[in-house]
Image (cartoon, rainbow, N blue to C red):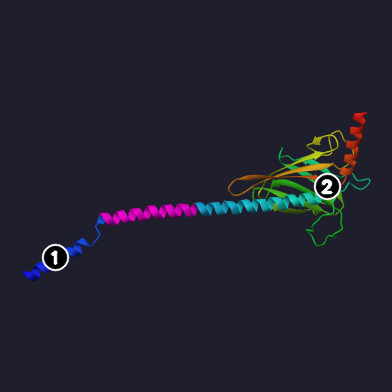
Amino acid sequence: MGYGNIAGRASGVRDESGFTLVELLLALFLFAIIAGVVFAAFAAVASGVERGRQSMELYRVGRAALLRMAQELEAALPPPEGSTSGFQGKKTSGGTGQDRIEFLTIPYRRYADRIPSHELCRVAYAVAESQQGRTALFREEDCSGDQDERRERATRLELTDLAVSLELTYFDAERDYDEWPPVRSTDQTLPCRVRIVLILRDAQQYERAFITTVALPMRGACEDERTRRTQTSSR
C-alpha cells in the first residue's frame, strides 16, 4: 500500500510538469507572430537599403552622363570655313523628349585609341531604343572628317540604359529655341547656352531629372549683343 501510494504520487507529479497540446499550439502561434514581425522589419530595412543603393547609383550615372555632355559642349567649335555641317539640335522621330544634338569638338575623353587626342571630331548625343528594346542614352563619335562616310565610321557607345528622355533648349541673345539653328537662321553659328534635361529611371520605375545649363565658347558675343541692345533701348 505504501509503495503504491508513493508511485501514484510520483506519476501525478510527472503529469503535472508536462505541456498540454493547447499550450504547445499557443507557444507556436506566439513564436510565429514574433518571427513574422522580425522578418517584416528586416525586409523593410533591406528594401530601404536597396532603394537607397539604387538612388545613389541613379545619381552617379546621371551626374556622370551630364558631366560628359557638358564638358564636350563647352568645347564645341563652329564649322570650318566652307563646311555646311555645324552645330545642330533636332527633334527626333520620337517627338518631344527625344532630342538629338550634334556638334564639332575635341573630345575630352578618348573612346578609341587610334584617334589622336587633338583630333577634331563630330560628337552626337541622343536617347534611342537599344537592341534590348529599352531606351538608352547613346554617344556617337566620328573623326573621319568626311560627311558621306560618317554613318559607316561613327563609333556608337551606349552610356546608360536607364535613360528615359533627353530634352535640349538652345539660347541666343534674344530668346530660347527647341531646335538649332533657328528656322529663320541660315548661318552656322553656335548658340550662347544649351540647357540639358536628362531623365533617368531606376528598376523601381522611379524617375529623376538631371539638369544643367552649358555656356558655349561664343557666349562673349552673346553678352556683347545683349549689352548693345540694352544700350540702344535705353537711349
Q: Is residue 215 shown left or right of residue 201?
A: right
Graded by Cα atoms within 10 Å as few (under 14), some (14 to 19) or many (20 or more), the crowding at tag 1 reads few
| Residue 152 x, y percent position in the rendering | 80, 52
Q: Is residue 152 left or right of residue 24?
A: right
Quadrant (top left/top right/bottom left/bottom right) for the C terminus? top right
Q: Is residue 169 above or below residue 65?
A: above
Specify which label sits upstream in the sequence, 1 or 2: 1
Report the residue marked by disc 2: 103
- Magenta stretch, main secondary structure, is helix
Residue drawn 74% across and 46% down? 126
Q: Amino acid at mark 1?
A: Arg
Label 1 sits on a secondary structure element that is helix
Query: Which is more toward the observer, 83 or 215?
Result: 215
Q: Residue at x 72, y 41 (%)?
A: 98
Q: Position of residue 36 (x, y in %)?
A: 41, 53
Residue 149 image point, x, y percent: 84, 51
Q: Which residues, given as a range, are shown in magenta? A: 22-43
**Residue picked out by circle 1:** 9
Residue at the (29%, 57%) spot, across then down: 24
Quarter-wise, where is residue 89 in the image?
top right
The reply to whether the C-beta atoms of the residues labelled 1 and 2 are less than 8 Å apart is no
Q: Is 28 above or below relative to 85? A: below
Residue lying at the far bottom of the rendered structure: 3
